């Protein structure tokens, strides 16, 4: 995995994450103010939007803007990224400011949602540093780091970071989002084929912990 | 939990699930034929749609039909229900037929998605029995049962089947879908507040297994 | 016809109307405030939304939320219910408050719009009683009751309350909304086949008056 | 009322109806073939669409194309016009052909829906003549004529053909669609204010019959 | 070309432009206030919307309101008309008022966008006169006149004002918007077939200048 | 300007164009078959879609997919790119195949539409080479090259390739698309402020010719 910071000139934080054939551009936008339902609370907000370019995949997908609506998968992943990044943030220390994380998949080869989370964390950290330089925040809002991996069972073997062809064959697919301290933010495991037992689940969780720790190390290096 | 079969006159399978203050109407519709991308494969398909009536909750929500688009939460839950029910089915034995499971929340008091999965399984079983009577299927498509519970950590205590007021206070919220044999179909755990550790995760999984086993017993009784 | 009050726990007024095979859930929601165009007038507002669950009918209908737009029939019936219920209300006595009536058809076997109006009146009465207990209204806003029937000509015979199979065969279909005092709020007659003459129209109006009087009696009983 | 035939060069039938300050352009389009659900039946179809230009009224209305959806009133009137015109047609004699009637209000001063029906009949008659010249129809599809008036009670007086300022003040508003033989196709009466009694209803129906007979005479003249 | 002023009773300015078989109805609506992004600037705004009636053309087009979205061509032409008319106006002298120009094509036979611009100028002039009578504007906002022609190369010959059949055959199609003083507001030339050289471009520009001058004369006459 | 070919692994042709601070990713997708209205003609088709990432600009723009519709500017530019690229292609030699050009602006600093056209040509050339290797085309469809520049008048000076800050100040803005042979495919000049005269127009066209020739040279180099 390669993490290139400041890939964009305009965004307050921006990262190009490359991971096998997968490339995700993560841009963090700082906005003063919060959504209407949160006004006057003194608390900040973090949200995310995920999308794929039409030709990021092997065959072209229609644009969601042209179809006029967002698909279920896009909705689901955007919400996952938003929840994951919110686990890093102390809303009170952020003050009534918002950070929007745009994760656009330029090229897809498996694991786009976990790459997006891992990259978006770095973009968020940069955006928060930008805010702190300008003294926009009452405190230090960055209280955790997060990284994410996908793990799966292909045949009978637990594997980390499946590429697209392995993903298609996986019996079980699990996305795990962990903090830098090794706690869970999100665990999502799905039996695509045969349901899995507790032993398999434990094996996948062990593997995920190793993967997330390695990604945390890479994030720390990139931010150094 | 109360499971009332045949609540609707027209549907091939229908169940009213009542669970605390939660009431979900699950209707299974049999359609001969499959979606276009699956035609000619000899395989069947199962899908689900979830929705809430506008006044199922404490304050009224706008209708998604009036707003002109489906929200992210609705999309996410519809997809979860569909995946869960597909784990019960042998597509080949189903033949090129589809079953659509409509899960409409008439009243909500926590745990609507897990109640929907648990009820939809019974409606699906009835719909498949209906098909088999008419000899529509080449084999017996029902190869598993599924039931689902939500578990959470309130304060420091793991709890089964949170009602709405407990759900709001939960630090961690986990939905677990298991087969009647005790294997996992889906595990979705989210830290709403503080990230959770492996011990907490194990405690929640233990509790979920007990809850799903009890629901499987109730499903078997209802179908007897 | 059976009228079950308080079918929902959260709504300020709620009724399950059952009428032959037809079941409509009517929920009244009280909201303080009025739509923007009415602000500052000192007058209240009443509106309604009608919808059918996808499997309320013999074959499944696509959800309007999924299609992304509301169909003409839904629009037309929602407007009819709203107009009918507004005839019961003194806007000045209501003050700047709104009542929204959600009429969701759980099962359909003919006459869903007239069942919805008849049930919604009872839900509205309960919601207004709820408001008066809380002294939200400057006066008593409930100045009329309304009930509605569908009448039709099948073959050459005028019939009250057609079920679905009769409705399909009807030459003429008429919906009549009347107050408890026997005046008309709405008369909608349509020749589905052969146009009808004044004599037939008079026969249908006579029959409707009898039907509405009977429904008024049932409403009074239910509210006693 | 002025009826100008052949106002458009391209349409198979077209009429500009002028009626007080109201001007509606009615265009009939002949299409060979019918909607999918009617294919293979040997029967034809007639449908209508109604719309208002943004500045047809006293203040400008946003375009429904810009808002991205059709409002309830537009839906309701389009359906009324379609039903009314279908009463003129023998589907079998039409064969598997469709006629679409576009009724666009260029200027509005009350009674736009009834002017549209009255004008659309003439456009339909011209379109059917056009088809018969080309021998597209197995028989003569035009079996009835229709005309429509709006009548209302202003104060205590029943009045025919209200203009906009009278319409606003009307206690009761009724649209009546009748055949040239004096039978009813559609009767829609609404109490905008006080509910009305049977005597008032009869008075409005009497007045409507006189109005429709006069319009039938004008249609016959225009088509002569 | 015929320019009929005051074709509509309600609009502050309105023109029916007839030009060969093309008929466009241009309505100017005056609104006090400006869009949100311009509030408090002291400057006015002018915008335009273009649309075609479904049967303005040889075959019927679906309504954009029914399809639920505006097509690219409509968007493009609406923007062109708006830009062109804004070239006539001194925003400061207009004050914080808006003029909306609705250009609806009743019948199309080539050159609808240039006819719309030419007619909309006259409607705008009338609307501004209406405002000045009411002393709504701090100064005289009308600082230019605009007129527009389409020119094209059919075969090898440059031609002015192509009708529909010529337009279809044109190798190059150019729309030119000029002020009454002979300066350019907009030049849009497109090679539909073979790319064109500088000589052809110059020939088209010469022809356009002659055409625009003639239209300016007609506008002046109409406004006299 | 930098042109990086094969920036994407999956697309049949792909180019990253960098031009000052502007970066546009152009992907060409080959699809066998043509849109419905062209089937059976033996002719191919080329189309384009343009979009901007939300944070490609200085402040974040809402996604068009989230808003549920495409804006006028996006529509206009997509159509311009499509028309320009179609000028390069012999439809007959292409056979019944389609090429879709997706131009996604990753970062914007003026001139995004002209950069998109210039890059899309190279992606198209690669996609056609890919097709010819697979013998998908009956002939050589690439009959022209195209390149595009934006020119403008800032103050009184004609300038080539304005960056964003110059663009904002420009009195006149012109986009010119030319073939490698020096002929015009599209000329679009707009007076943003004061209308411009023939002399200014000629100056801009001269400058554009120089710029397009230089870009043609760069394209040739890149494809060598």
Image: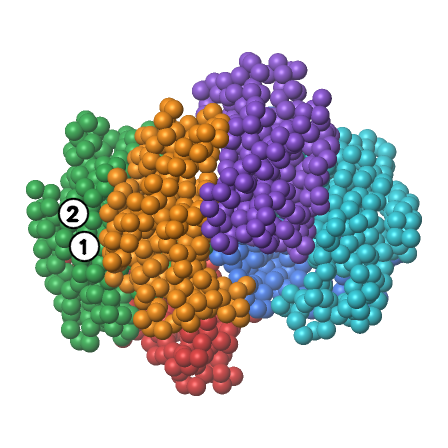
Chain colours: A green, B red, C blue, D cyan, E purple, F orange
Q: Position of residue A158 (x, y in %)?
A: 15, 70
Q: In this rendering, would C111 be left or right of D137?
A: left
- Which quarter of the figure is the N terminus of chain D placed in? top right
**Tag 1's secondary structure?**
strand
* SS label for mark 2: strand
> Percent from the top left, x then y, of residue F117?
37, 49
How far is mark 2 from mark 1, CA to CA? Answer: 8 Å
Q: Is residue C108 visible?
A: yes
Q: Is residue F112 above or below residue F146?
A: above
Q: Chain of mark 2?
A: A
Q: In front: F124, or A32?
A: F124
Towards the viewer: A80 or B186: A80
Residue D86: x and y, percent? Answer: 76, 59
Residue at mark 2 shares a chain with residue at mark 1: yes
The residue that label 2 is drawn on is A4
Mark found first going from the N terminus, 2 or 1: 2
Q: Is residue F92 above or below residue E211?
A: below
- Is the C-beta separation of discs 2 and 1 under 8 Å? yes
Q: For mark 1, does the 10 Å Cα neighbourhood hold few (<14), some (14 to 19), or many (20 or more) residues? A: many
Q: Residue at x 12, y 59 (%)?
A: A211
D34 and F140: which is toward the camera: F140
Instruction: Indicate which disc residue A18 carries.
Output: 1
Tell me the quarter of the picture where residue F21 sits. Answer: top left
Tell me which residue sits at (78%, 64%) in the image.
Answer: D131
Name the residue: 26% across, 44% down.
F1
* Left or right, residue A146 beside residue E11: left
Q: Is residue A197 left or right of residue C170?
A: left
| Front-lying residue, D49 or E203 | E203
- Identify the subunit bearing mark 1: A
Up/down of A211 relative to B41, above or below: above
């Amino acid at each position: 995995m390669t993490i290139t910071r400041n890939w964009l000139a305009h965004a307050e934080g921006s990262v190009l994450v490359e991971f096998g054939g997968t490339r995700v551009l993560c841009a963090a936008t700082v906005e003063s103010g919060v959504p209407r339902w949160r006004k006057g609370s003194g608390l900040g907000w973090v949200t995310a939007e995920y999308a794929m370019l039409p030709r990021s995949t092997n065959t072209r997908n229609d644009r969601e803007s042209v179809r006029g609506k967002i698909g279920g998968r896009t909705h689901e992943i955007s919400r996952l990224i938003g929840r994951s990044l919110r686990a890093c943030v102390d809303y009170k220390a952020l003050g009534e400011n918002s950070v929007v994380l745009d994760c656009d998949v330029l090229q897809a080869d498996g694991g786009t949602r976990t790459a997006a989370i891992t990259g978006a964390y770095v973009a968020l950290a940069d955006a928060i540093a930008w805010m702190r330089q300008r003294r926009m925040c009452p405190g230090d809002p960055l209280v955790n780091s997060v990284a994410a991996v996908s793990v799966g069972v292909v045949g009978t073997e637990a594997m980390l970071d499946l590429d697209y062809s392995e993903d298609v064959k996986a019996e079980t697919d699990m996305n795990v989002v962990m903090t830098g301290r090794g706690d869970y933010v999100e665990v999502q495991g799905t039996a695509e084929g045969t349901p899995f037992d507790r032993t398999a689940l434990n094996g996948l969780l062990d593997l995920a912990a190793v993967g997330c720790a390695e990604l945390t190390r890479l994030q720390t290096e990139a931010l150094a």
